């Protein structure tokens, strides 16, 4: 009797804990395309196509390497539609002596696998996912007894732990963080090299047709599908980033240039989150580019911070606070998500452009997500649950990632997308992000005046928008301050959009503060 090893769509790693050390002739790998996963929110078409294609390619690679893989396609007539239903069917087929599964990246799925030991007659072993730098128990220990969980302090621990960019126990170059060098406005004519786009092969083409057929009314376009779907392609995407874009990644990570959706961002998050690329290896390569004199310290430090800092931190935070994060709405933001988040039809050009990019690419980078979309949701007082569900649907980085970022955002409620830049494509989480974090820490205590003071201190200038907002009183002031933190942002709509955001918030909210002081 073999061991049954189910592998989820975000566990496409040859060295996964459940495969390591296993004999091939004693193992049946189970992979399942299931209706529940594809529809529990109405994912962007590219996201479903990416996951199914990457799963099918991974299954083929495993088979080529001699593993026995039982792969259930979405259209298999007997498909039970859920992970639990499919594992139950596979147990009937293979009569395994045990099921070995790596813990899920998502709380919702983890709840269901924790029921498996009671449901199934064979042994069920749930293994920790050791593809992260910081085990969840270590994060819990770090968080214990701390009033506020500052990413920056967690990040320093991870730098010490990994030895990345360390020089005799001290941070390379003398500083832990070089974000002050990472806020350059785009120069006239700035042009980023085109990242590799991968032409859909036969497997991807088949999946694209399946998605067009079965998920025709889901958001998003499949026309631009060019994601890496194998480890080899993901490596090629990483090679191109390290050869051509990392140098400028840092300085221009806060920039937006009309017509260049990705600029110098790595676009590696889907591959990292699917399991095709090893996050630590990428950090080591980034460090090497610096040591070889091919990339400046500020770019490399910024890149590494997204991976061993933010990515790990948000994962830890998510598991520490779920399921509470799902319901959290500390500032009681109740407005529904505007329809234009689905159509892109708004006069606010920055927003329209970010939504277009999201529809076309299933991707938006840090500044688009956080400073434009997130800030808008914040100042408009959109319900965090609605914001979170939108992010979960529209970005191909995988919901496990998006969910973590938005769950976190939820904790600070209306600060909505301020923290929504986490994890995806390792873009710059710059000073602006840190401000968002300050807002979060204080918001958690509902110390709104504190946030406001802090923001004014951190943001420096108080523009006329803030003055305008301040005249309205109430919470709008702190929110408008955050909005104004996008000053200096060179988006397609420029200054007008920024004003538009603040005006929108004030006009739609009226004078009634949405927050009830606790
Ligand atoms: C996102 C997603 C989708 C759309 N479909 C599947 C699927 O059919 N089978 C699968 O194994 N994984 C899928 N995923 C990714 C999972 O939702 C992800 O692996 C879990 O959230 C992990 O907790």
Image (tube, helix red, strand yellow):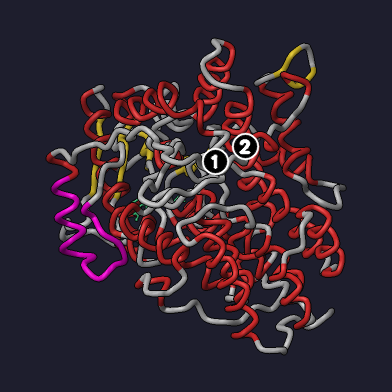
Residue range corresponding to the magenta coloring: 205-223
Q: Position of residue 69 (x, y in %)?
A: 25, 36
Q: Are marks 2 and 1 in contact (CB under 8 Å)?
A: yes
Nearer to me, 87 or 311 = 311
- Tell me which label, 2 or 1, sits earlier in the chain: 2
**Residue 19 as seen in the image, left or right of residue 369:** left
Is disc 2's CB within 8 Å of ligand 1? no
Rendered image: mark on residue 516: none
Q: Secondary structure at mark 2?
A: loop
**Residue 357 is drawn in which quadrant?**
bottom left
Most foreground residue, 240 or 138: 240
Pick the residue in front: 357 or 507. 507
The quadrant of the image that shows the C terminus is bottom right
Q: Is residue 39 magenta?
A: no
Residue 253 circle label: 1
Q: Residues within 10 Å of mark 1 (few under 14, many from 20)?
A: many
Helix, strand or loop status at disc 1:
loop
Say which residue appears at 30% left-offset and 35% top-offset: 28
Mark pair 2, 1: CA separation: 7 Å
Q: Is residue 267 above or below residue 224?
A: above
* Residue indicated by mark 2: 182
């Amino acid at each position: 009797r073999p061991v049954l090893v189910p592998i989820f769509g975000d566990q496409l790693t040859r060295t996964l804990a459940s495969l390591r050390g296993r004999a091939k002739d004693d193992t049946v790998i189970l992979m399942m395309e299931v209706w529940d996963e594809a529809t529990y929110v109405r994912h962007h078409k590219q996201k479903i196509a990416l996951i199914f294609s990457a799963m099918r390619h991974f299954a083929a690679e495993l088979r080529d390497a001699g593993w026995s893989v039982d792969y259930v396609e979405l259209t298999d007539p007997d498909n039970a539609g859920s992970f639990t239903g499919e594992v139950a069917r596979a147990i009937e087929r293979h009569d395994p002596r045990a099921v070995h599964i790596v813990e899920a990246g998502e709380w919702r799925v983890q709840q269901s696998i924790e029921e498996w030991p009671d449901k199934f007659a064979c042994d069920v072993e749930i293994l920790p996912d050791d593809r992260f730098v910081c085990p969840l128990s270590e994060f819990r220990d770090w968080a214990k007894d701390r009033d506020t969980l500052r990413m920056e302090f967690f990040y320093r621990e991870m730098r010490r732990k990994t030895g990345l960019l360390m020089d005799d126990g001290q941070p390379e170059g003398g500083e832990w963080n070089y974000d002050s060098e990472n806020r350059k406005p785009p120069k006239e004519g700035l042009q980023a090299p085109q990242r590799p786009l991968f032409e859909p092969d036969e497997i991807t083409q088949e999946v694209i047709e399946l998605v067009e057929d079965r998920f025709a009314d889901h958001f998003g376009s499949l026309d631009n599908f060019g994601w890496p779907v194998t480890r080899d392609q993901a490596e090629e995407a990483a090679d191109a980033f390290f050869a051509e874009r990392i140098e400028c990644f840092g300085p221009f990570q806060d920039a937006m240039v009309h017509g260049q959706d990705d600029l110098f961002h790595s676009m590696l998050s889907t591959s990292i989150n699917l399991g095709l690329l090893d996050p630590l290896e990428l950090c080591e390569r980034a460090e090497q580019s610096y040591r070889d004199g091919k990339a400046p310290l500020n770019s490399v430090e910024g890149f590494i911070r997204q991976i061993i800092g933010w990515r790990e931190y948000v994962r830890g935070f998510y598991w520490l606070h779920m399921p509470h994060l799902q319901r959290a709405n500390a500032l009681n933001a109740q407005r529904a998500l505007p329809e234009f988040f689905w159509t892109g039809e708004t006069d606010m050009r920055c927003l329209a452009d970010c939504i277009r990019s999201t529809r076309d690419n299933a991707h938006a980078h840090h500044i688009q997500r956080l400073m434009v979309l997130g800030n808008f949701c914040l100042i408009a007082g959109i319900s965090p649950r609605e914001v979170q569900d939108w992010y979960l649907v529209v970005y191909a980085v995988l919901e496990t990632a998006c969910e973590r970022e938005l769950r976190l955002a939820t904790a600070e409620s209306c600060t909505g997308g301020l923290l929504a830049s986490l994890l995806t494509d390792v873009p710059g989480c710059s000073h602006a992000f840190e401000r968002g974090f300050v807002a979060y820490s204080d918001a958690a205590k509902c110390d709104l005046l504190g946030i406001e003071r802090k923001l004014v201190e951190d943001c420096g200038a108080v523009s006329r928008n803030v003055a305008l907002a301040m005249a309205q009183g109430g919470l709008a002031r702190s929110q408008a301050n955050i909005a104004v933190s996008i000053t200096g942002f060179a988006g397609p709509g420029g200054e007008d959009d920024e004003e538009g955001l603040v005006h929108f918030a004030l006009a739609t909210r009226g004078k009634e503060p949405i927050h009830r002081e606790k």
